Amino acid sequence: MRIAVVGGTGLVGRYVVDSLKKSGHEAVILARSTGVDVVTGEGLAEALAGVDAVVDVTNTAATEAAAAQEFFAAETGHLLAAEEEAGVRHHVVLSIVGIEMVPSNAHYAGKRRQEDLVEAGSVPFTILRATQFHEFAAMVVGWNRQGDTASVPPLLMQPVAARDVGKALAEVAVGQPQGRIDLAGPEPQDLVDMARRTLAARGETVKLVPSWAGPLNTEMAGDVLLPGPNARIASTTFDTWLKSDDAKATG
Protein backbone atom coordinates (compact mmCIF):
# COMPACT_ATOMS: atom_id res chain seq x y z
CA MET A 1 0.00 0.00 0.00
CA ARG A 2 0.98 3.63 -0.45
CA ILE A 3 0.64 5.46 2.89
CA ALA A 4 1.21 9.18 3.44
CA VAL A 5 2.63 10.14 6.84
CA VAL A 6 2.00 13.75 7.84
CA GLY A 7 4.83 14.75 10.16
CA GLY A 8 6.87 11.75 9.09
CA THR A 9 10.16 13.30 10.21
CA GLY A 10 9.12 13.78 13.86
CA LEU A 11 9.42 11.60 16.96
CA VAL A 12 6.47 9.30 16.22
CA GLY A 13 6.38 9.89 12.47
CA ARG A 14 9.78 8.38 11.83
CA TYR A 15 8.71 5.20 13.64
CA VAL A 16 5.56 5.04 11.51
CA VAL A 17 7.66 5.36 8.36
CA ASP A 18 10.16 2.73 9.51
CA SER A 19 7.41 0.28 10.42
CA LEU A 20 5.62 0.73 7.10
CA LYS A 21 8.80 0.17 5.11
CA LYS A 22 9.71 -2.94 7.11
CA SER A 23 6.25 -4.32 6.29
CA GLY A 24 6.78 -3.77 2.58
CA HIS A 25 4.60 -0.68 2.14
CA GLU A 26 5.50 2.63 0.54
CA ALA A 27 5.69 5.56 2.98
CA VAL A 28 5.28 9.07 1.58
CA ILE A 29 6.47 11.73 4.01
CA LEU A 30 4.37 14.90 4.04
CA ALA A 31 6.28 17.78 5.62
CA ARG A 32 7.44 21.25 4.75
CA SER A 33 10.86 19.77 4.02
CA THR A 34 9.25 17.66 1.27
CA GLY A 35 7.30 20.59 -0.21
CA VAL A 36 3.97 20.02 1.56
CA ASP A 37 2.38 22.47 3.98
CA VAL A 38 -0.76 21.00 5.52
CA VAL A 39 -1.64 24.26 7.30
CA THR A 40 -1.99 26.10 3.98
CA GLY A 41 -2.74 23.06 1.82
CA GLU A 42 0.23 23.73 -0.45
CA GLY A 43 1.40 20.61 -2.28
CA LEU A 44 -1.25 18.33 -0.81
CA ALA A 45 -3.08 17.42 -4.01
CA GLU A 46 0.08 16.23 -5.73
CA ALA A 47 1.39 14.40 -2.65
CA LEU A 48 -1.81 12.40 -2.15
CA ALA A 49 -2.01 11.07 -5.70
CA GLY A 50 -2.36 7.29 -5.50
CA VAL A 51 -2.33 7.25 -1.69
CA ASP A 52 -4.44 4.59 0.04
CA ALA A 53 -4.31 5.97 3.60
CA VAL A 54 -3.02 8.97 5.53
CA VAL A 55 -1.45 8.91 9.01
CA ASP A 56 -1.49 12.33 10.70
CA VAL A 57 0.99 12.79 13.56
CA THR A 58 1.50 16.54 13.22
CA ASN A 59 1.96 18.66 16.32
CA THR A 60 2.07 22.31 17.34
CA ALA A 61 3.93 24.28 19.97
CA ALA A 62 0.99 26.68 20.45
CA THR A 63 0.42 27.55 24.11
CA GLU A 64 -2.97 29.26 23.69
CA ALA A 65 -6.16 27.27 23.11
CA ALA A 66 -7.33 29.45 20.23
CA ALA A 67 -4.01 29.07 18.41
CA ALA A 68 -3.95 25.30 18.92
CA GLN A 69 -7.52 24.97 17.68
CA GLU A 70 -6.75 27.15 14.66
CA PHE A 71 -3.71 25.04 13.78
CA PHE A 72 -5.48 21.68 14.01
CA ALA A 73 -8.61 22.97 12.29
CA ALA A 74 -6.56 24.27 9.35
CA GLU A 75 -4.34 21.24 8.84
CA THR A 76 -7.12 18.70 9.39
CA GLY A 77 -9.54 20.59 7.16
CA HIS A 78 -7.04 20.76 4.30
CA LEU A 79 -6.11 17.10 4.73
CA LEU A 80 -9.67 15.80 4.73
CA ALA A 81 -10.64 17.89 1.69
CA ALA A 82 -7.59 16.76 -0.27
CA GLU A 83 -8.11 13.14 0.78
CA GLU A 84 -11.71 13.17 -0.40
CA GLU A 85 -10.63 14.62 -3.74
CA ALA A 86 -7.85 12.04 -4.13
CA GLY A 87 -10.01 9.07 -3.10
CA VAL A 88 -8.03 8.25 0.05
CA ARG A 89 -9.82 5.41 1.85
CA HIS A 90 -8.56 5.77 5.43
CA HIS A 91 -7.60 8.73 7.62
CA VAL A 92 -5.60 7.81 10.73
CA VAL A 93 -4.84 10.42 13.38
CA LEU A 94 -2.84 10.25 16.60
CA SER A 95 -4.59 11.75 19.61
CA ILE A 96 -4.26 11.58 23.41
CA VAL A 97 -6.06 9.58 26.09
CA GLY A 98 -8.18 11.75 28.38
CA ILE A 99 -8.31 14.99 26.39
CA GLU A 100 -11.95 15.57 27.29
CA MET A 101 -11.06 15.47 31.01
CA VAL A 102 -8.64 18.44 30.93
CA PRO A 103 -10.59 21.48 29.67
CA SER A 104 -7.99 24.14 30.48
CA ASN A 105 -5.08 22.59 28.54
CA ALA A 106 -4.50 24.47 25.27
CA HIS A 107 -3.02 21.54 23.38
CA TYR A 108 -5.86 19.25 24.42
CA ALA A 109 -8.36 21.85 23.19
CA GLY A 110 -6.70 21.69 19.78
CA LYS A 111 -6.79 17.91 19.75
CA ARG A 112 -10.50 17.90 20.65
CA ARG A 113 -11.14 20.18 17.69
CA GLN A 114 -9.13 17.85 15.46
CA GLU A 115 -11.06 14.78 16.59
CA ASP A 116 -14.40 16.54 16.01
CA LEU A 117 -13.45 17.38 12.42
CA VAL A 118 -12.25 13.86 11.67
CA GLU A 119 -15.40 12.28 13.08
CA ALA A 120 -17.62 14.67 11.12
CA GLY A 121 -15.72 14.22 7.86
CA SER A 122 -16.51 11.97 4.92
CA VAL A 123 -13.25 9.98 4.95
CA PRO A 124 -13.42 6.71 6.95
CA PHE A 125 -11.18 7.11 9.99
CA THR A 126 -9.33 5.67 12.95
CA ILE A 127 -8.45 7.90 15.91
CA LEU A 128 -5.69 6.26 17.92
CA ARG A 129 -5.55 7.83 21.36
CA ALA A 130 -2.25 7.09 23.10
CA THR A 131 -1.12 7.76 26.64
CA GLN A 132 1.98 9.89 27.24
CA PHE A 133 5.21 8.55 25.80
CA HIS A 134 8.14 7.13 27.77
CA GLU A 135 9.98 10.11 26.25
CA PHE A 136 7.60 12.56 27.96
CA ALA A 137 9.52 12.84 31.25
CA ALA A 138 12.65 14.15 29.52
CA MET A 139 10.53 16.58 27.52
CA VAL A 140 8.95 18.03 30.68
CA VAL A 141 12.36 18.43 32.33
CA GLY A 142 13.58 20.26 29.22
CA TRP A 143 10.56 22.58 29.21
CA ASN A 144 10.84 23.49 32.90
CA ARG A 145 14.57 23.37 33.56
CA GLN A 146 16.25 26.45 35.00
CA GLY A 147 19.91 25.84 35.61
CA ASP A 148 20.24 22.62 37.62
CA THR A 149 16.60 22.60 38.76
CA ALA A 150 13.39 21.54 37.01
CA SER A 151 9.79 21.45 38.18
CA VAL A 152 7.85 18.28 37.30
CA PRO A 153 4.16 17.62 38.07
CA PRO A 154 3.48 14.36 39.97
CA LEU A 155 1.30 12.91 37.22
CA LEU A 156 0.03 9.34 37.33
CA MET A 157 0.15 7.84 33.83
CA GLN A 158 0.59 4.58 31.96
CA PRO A 159 3.23 5.61 29.44
CA VAL A 160 3.95 3.97 26.12
CA ALA A 161 7.07 3.96 23.95
CA ALA A 162 6.85 6.25 20.94
CA ARG A 163 8.21 3.40 18.82
CA ASP A 164 5.27 1.22 19.88
CA VAL A 165 2.87 4.04 18.98
CA GLY A 166 4.44 4.37 15.54
CA LYS A 167 4.18 0.62 14.96
CA ALA A 168 0.52 0.61 16.03
CA LEU A 169 -0.31 3.51 13.72
CA ALA A 170 1.34 1.73 10.80
CA GLU A 171 -0.61 -1.46 11.50
CA VAL A 172 -3.88 0.47 11.76
CA ALA A 173 -3.23 2.37 8.53
CA VAL A 174 -3.00 -0.75 6.37
CA GLY A 175 -6.19 -2.21 7.88
CA GLN A 176 -9.83 -1.23 7.98
CA PRO A 177 -11.03 1.98 9.71
CA GLN A 178 -11.82 1.32 13.38
CA GLY A 179 -13.28 4.54 14.74
CA ARG A 180 -11.63 5.35 18.08
CA ILE A 181 -9.16 3.08 19.89
CA ASP A 182 -6.85 3.62 22.88
CA LEU A 183 -3.22 2.52 23.31
CA ALA A 184 -1.19 2.47 26.52
CA GLY A 185 1.99 1.02 27.94
CA PRO A 186 2.07 -2.04 30.20
CA GLU A 187 2.28 -0.40 33.65
CA PRO A 188 1.47 2.82 35.58
CA GLN A 189 4.26 5.25 36.42
CA ASP A 190 4.75 8.50 38.31
CA LEU A 191 6.17 11.29 36.14
CA VAL A 192 8.58 12.61 38.78
CA ASP A 193 10.04 9.13 39.23
CA MET A 194 10.23 8.68 35.46
CA ALA A 195 12.16 11.94 35.19
CA ARG A 196 14.54 10.93 37.98
CA ARG A 197 15.25 7.55 36.37
CA THR A 198 15.66 9.03 32.90
CA LEU A 199 18.20 11.56 34.15
CA ALA A 200 20.07 8.87 36.09
CA ALA A 201 20.27 6.66 32.99
CA ARG A 202 21.81 9.57 31.08
CA GLY A 203 24.21 10.52 33.85
CA GLU A 204 22.61 13.96 34.28
CA THR A 205 22.25 15.76 37.60
CA VAL A 206 19.13 17.89 37.90
CA LYS A 207 17.19 18.67 41.09
CA LEU A 208 13.54 17.80 40.53
CA VAL A 209 10.87 19.86 42.27
CA PRO A 210 7.35 18.35 42.25
CA SER A 211 4.95 21.13 41.25
CA TRP A 212 1.49 21.60 39.72
CA ALA A 213 2.38 25.05 38.39
CA GLY A 214 2.01 25.47 34.63
CA PRO A 215 -0.20 23.86 31.97
CA LEU A 216 0.15 20.34 33.45
CA ASN A 217 -2.01 21.26 36.43
CA THR A 218 -4.24 19.53 38.98
CA GLU A 219 -6.89 18.82 36.32
CA MET A 220 -4.55 15.97 35.39
CA ALA A 221 -4.31 14.59 38.94
CA GLY A 222 -5.60 11.15 39.92
CA ASP A 223 -6.49 8.67 37.18
CA VAL A 224 -7.42 11.23 34.51
CA LEU A 225 -4.54 10.22 32.20
CA LEU A 226 -4.94 6.47 32.64
CA PRO A 227 -6.42 4.34 29.84
CA GLY A 228 -9.80 2.67 29.98
CA PRO A 229 -10.29 -1.09 30.39
CA ASN A 230 -10.52 -1.72 26.63
CA ALA A 231 -7.21 -0.07 25.72
CA ARG A 232 -4.66 -1.98 23.70
CA ILE A 233 -1.50 -2.57 25.71
CA ALA A 234 1.92 -2.19 24.09
CA SER A 235 4.76 -4.41 25.28
CA THR A 236 7.71 -2.09 25.98
CA THR A 237 8.09 -1.32 29.69
CA PHE A 238 9.68 1.89 30.91
CA ASP A 239 12.63 -0.07 32.34
CA THR A 240 13.23 -1.74 28.97
CA TRP A 241 12.98 1.58 27.17
CA LEU A 242 15.52 3.20 29.54
CA LYS A 243 18.12 0.67 28.40
CA SER A 244 17.41 1.19 24.69
CA ASP A 245 19.01 3.42 22.09
CA ASP A 246 15.66 5.25 21.82
CA ALA A 247 16.08 6.58 25.36
CA LYS A 248 19.56 7.89 24.58
CA ALA A 249 18.34 9.59 21.40
CA THR A 250 15.60 11.73 22.95
CA GLY A 251 15.38 14.67 25.30
Image (cartoon, rainbow, N blue to C red):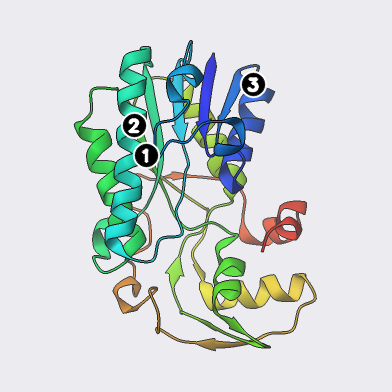
Q: Amino acid at mark 3?
A: Ser
Image coordinates of residue 110 in percent, x first then y, are 31, 53
**What distance separates the C-alpha of mark 2 from that of mark 3?**
28 Å
Around disc 3, counting alpha carbons within 10 Å, would you say few (fewer than 14), some (14 to 19), or many (20 or more)?
few
Label 2 secondary element: helix
User: Which residue is located at x 32 percent, y 79 percent?
Assistant: 218
User: Which residue is located at x 29 percent, y 62 percent?
Assistant: 65
Image quadrant where one finds the C terminus: bottom right
> Is disc 2 in contact with disc 1, using a CB cutoff of under 8 Å?
yes
Image coordinates of residue 48 in percent, x first then y, are 46, 19
Q: Is residue 59 above or below residue 62?
A: above
Residue at mark 2: 78
For marks 3 and 1 on the same chain, the one whose residue lies earlier in the sequence: 3
> Is disc 3 in contact with disc 1, using a CB cutoff of under 8 Å?
no
Residue at mark 1: 75
Kindly tell me whether residue 53 is visible in this rendering: yes
Q: Nearer the viewer, mark 2 or mark 3?
A: 2
Residue at mark 3: 23
Image coordinates of residue 107 in percent, x first then y, are 36, 59
In terms of depth relative to the viewer, which is nearer, 208 or 45? Answer: 45
Image quadrant where one finds the N terminus: top right
Q: Amino acid at mark 2?
A: His
**What distance separates the C-alpha of mark 3 from that of mark 1?**
28 Å
Q: Is residue 242 left or right of residue 173?
A: right
> Is disc 2 in contact with disc 3, using a CB cutoff of under 8 Å?
no
